Image (cartoon, grey):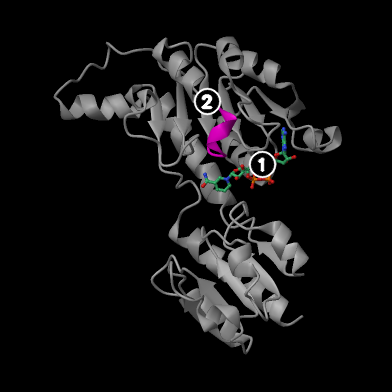
Amino acid sequence: MNACILQPAYSNFQAEEQVLAAAGFSLTTAHITAGNPLPEALINAEVILIRDTLLGAEVINHLTKCKAVVRYGVGYNTVDVDTLTQRNIMLCNVPDYDTDEVSTHAMAMYLTLLRRLKSRDRDVRQGIWAVDDREPMYSPQHSVLGLIGFGRIARRLLEKMQGFRPAEVLVYDPYVDLHTLSCFGVRSATVAEICSRASMISLHVPYTPDTHHLIGAQELQNMRADCILLNTSRGGLIDEKALNQALLEKRIFGAGLDVFEQEPINPNSPLLARENLIVSDHCGWYAESSMNDLRTKAAQEAVRVLRG
Ligand code: NAD
């Protein structure tokens, strides 16, 4: 067997099958169940496609023909990379299928918070029509945007936000050179400057020991009262306890979180009681089209490996 999807998370594999069949390769699926031997289809596969399944040494060391593991998506912290390396098995990922979706999601959260759509929707349904008696709202026009991380998603978000004609865009990304930043019309800034000046701060960095709690009590303390903080990257970037306190005391305007320190977030988390917070279930990446794109690109990676 050429390729095998392990613990398939989808009900059909048409996209993958089409790509592999067109290139003359076969595809199967396999499940690992506790207490049972590993399926032959997996042991003999040349390429294994996985989504969120943990892939450790206890499986990898039994693979006889495997040349590569293809991970649907960006991260690969579910895979034992050391054992793959020892066994000379490549690891491929699909990093760029959801740039549009995540940037749209960040923007949707921003606008929903900015226009207070949560409470307006609820009020109207309850018969409250208080047009002139509202908490303050702000315009996105001519605001200062802060982007922390300036990779694929942040750049796409910038493109979308340009329509609001921001007065200034501040970027913190020590790995992007100043010339590139100036080509995008943005200015390099420290996290501290972004926190003190921006009215929209969106996080687009990976979660590493360096970025753990990048936004903590101090950063939140320094933010403007009209600041909206967005996190569509990874939960650990924000100290949730400190964020809860800032939202409770209305020290910032609001926050939008698609990701959490622990996922799924405990429904009893005090954070979820905050009115000025909007949340979603790590679905920023999702759209029918991006899902199809992900599956097609994962299969294309498999074909690249199988063709040598
Ligand atoms: P990317 O690799 O294109 O960009 C990341 C940027 O972060 C790079 O420009 C890099 O230079 C910068 N960076 C790295 N370490 C940094 C640090 N310590 N300080 C500041 N900048 C740093 O990644 P991307 O595709 O734009 O994704 C960004 C984030 O979005 C990732 O954390 C990813 O896991 C997350 N993500 C979330 C979803 C979702 O569904 N919510 C989907 C896809 C990606």
Residue 280 vs 247, above or below: the answer is below
Please name whichever residue, 58 or 49, is drawn nearer the observer in this view of the structure: 58
- Indicate yes or no: mark 1 CB to ligand 1 under 8 Å: yes
- The quarter of the image holding the N terminus is bottom right
User: In the figure, residue 65 lies in which quadrant?
Assistant: bottom right
Crowding around mark 1 (Cα neighbors within 10 Å: few <14, some 14 to 19, many 20+) is: some
Crowding around mark 2 (Cα neighbors within 10 Å: few <14, some 14 to 19, many 20+) is: many
Taking 178 as reference, is 228 left or right?
left
Residue 250 vs 265, above or below: the answer is above
Q: Residue furthest left?
A: 127
Give SS at disc 2.
strand
Taking 226 as reference, is 90 left or right?
right
Q: How many marks?
A: 2
Q: Which residue is mark 2?
A: 229
Q: Which residue is mark 1?
A: 155
- The mark that comes first in sequence, 2 or 1, is 1
Looking at the image, do the residues carrying marks 2 and 1 touch, with CB atoms under 8 Å apart? no
Q: Residue at x 53, y 61 (%)?
A: 51
Q: Is residue 297 visible?
A: no
Q: Residue at x 28, y 25 (%)?
A: 120
Please name whichever residue, 201 or 206, is drawn nearer the observer in this view of the structure: 206
Where residue 139 appears, x then y in whole percent? 48, 21
Q: Point out the frontmost of discs 2 and 1.
A: 2
- Type of the residue with mark 2: Leu
Where residue 34 appears, x then y in whole percent? 43, 66
Which range of residues does the magenta coloring cover? 232-239
Q: Residue furthest bottom?
A: 24
